[in-house]
Image: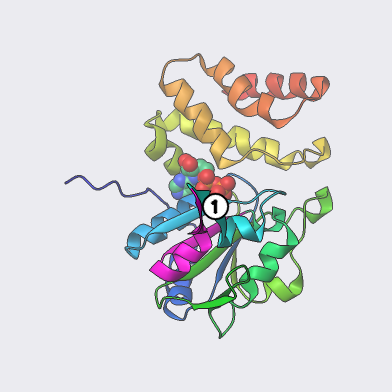
Amino acid sequence: MLVNIPYYHAVGKEKEVFEHAYKNKIPFLLKGPTGTGKSRFVEYMAHQLDKKIITISCHEETSSTDLIGRFIIKGAETVWLDGPLTTAVKEGAIIYLDEIAEARPDVIVAIHSLTDHRRELFIDKLGETVKAHDDFMLVASFNPGYQRGFKELKPSTRQRFIAVSFEYPETKIETEILVKETNVDHDVAKKLVAIGNKIRNLTELGLTETVSTRLLVDAAKIIHSGLPKRLSVHVAIVEPLTDDLQTVEALKDLCDLMI
Ligand code: ADP
């Protein structure tokens, strides 16, 4: 049988740190901007450890009920339905709360007893406490963009995790990622990474988020599938970054010179 192994290129000691967090039953926090490989890394580690992974993309409406479970009407009966967190706690899966800081505050309250020595989940609607399966692991990510008005995580929550920062990989690794992910020419990959680095250094543009590895991968994909290079860079890198017309034009000119 063909098994699809998620491709992940390590940028530091994150694999070792994750393994030790798992072994010691300590929750794991991935910090960093969007598109830096956080989700890919968790998928990869789940595969390495042969664990099921349940991913929840948190947003401002995500509540503890969404995670823990709810009563639903089934025919003439009311039945209880476990939410994804309860399922992971019972089955011993890895739960990945992507962008945890975006969720409602009651989500943070709900996970507290799971993130310390108790490792238990209180299901308030049932009045029950569930002990976590030995293999259960809680993983969360967050984007520490506090200067840009993103939501913060309180120290009392952060200090329950082992935390690793994810940043844009160094040139050689990022080039390799583009080639591996998209089969694009090595030379084109190098140029795309150079564009990424150039724009990342233009801090005076005041972009909310700068060029992520994901944007570079997307550009490489459409170039590899045959779209002209300049157009690809415009639509995959420049346009998603900003709506400011002057900045868009300036970035397009810059990219045209570099691709
Ligand atoms: P995040 O969860 O940080 O927003 P993702 O994990 O979704 O980011 O990564 C976005 C894309 O970037 C992935 O689909 C993958 O193509 C690529 N990528 C980024 N970093 C890596 C890496 N270290 N190894 C392999 N692919 C990576």
Residue 92 visible, this orientation? no
Q: Quadrant of residue 208?
A: top right
> Could you tell me residue 25's position as x and y percent?
48, 78
> Could you tell me residue 42's position as x and y percent?
46, 57
Q: Is 44 a magenta residue?
A: no
Callout 1 amino acid: Ile
Q: Nearer the viewer, residue 82 or 90?
A: 82
- From the viewer's perspective, is residue 214 above or below residue 70? above
Q: Disc 1 marks which residue?
A: 72
Q: Is mark 1 within 8 Å of ligand 1?
A: no
Q: Nearer the viewer, residue 119 or 6?
A: 119
Q: Nearer the viewer, residue 102 or 244?
A: 102
The outermost residue toward the bottom is 117
Q: Residue at the location (70% across, 19% down)?
A: 253
| Left or right side of 184 for 29 | right
- From the viewer's perspective, is residue 219 above or below residue 197? above
Q: Quadrant of the C terminus?
A: top right
Q: How many marks?
A: 1
> Could you tell me residue 124's position as x and y percent?
63, 71
Q: Residue at the location (55% across, 76% down)?
A: 128
The magenta stretch is 76-98
Q: Residue at the location (44% across, 74% down)?
A: 22
Q: Quadrant of residue 27?
A: bottom right
Residue 88 visible, this orientation? yes
Q: Residue at the location (65% across, 58% down)?
A: 100
- Per the image, label 1 sits on a secondary structure element best described as strand
> Could you tell me residue 58's position as x and y percent?
63, 51
| Left or right side of 208 for 16 | left
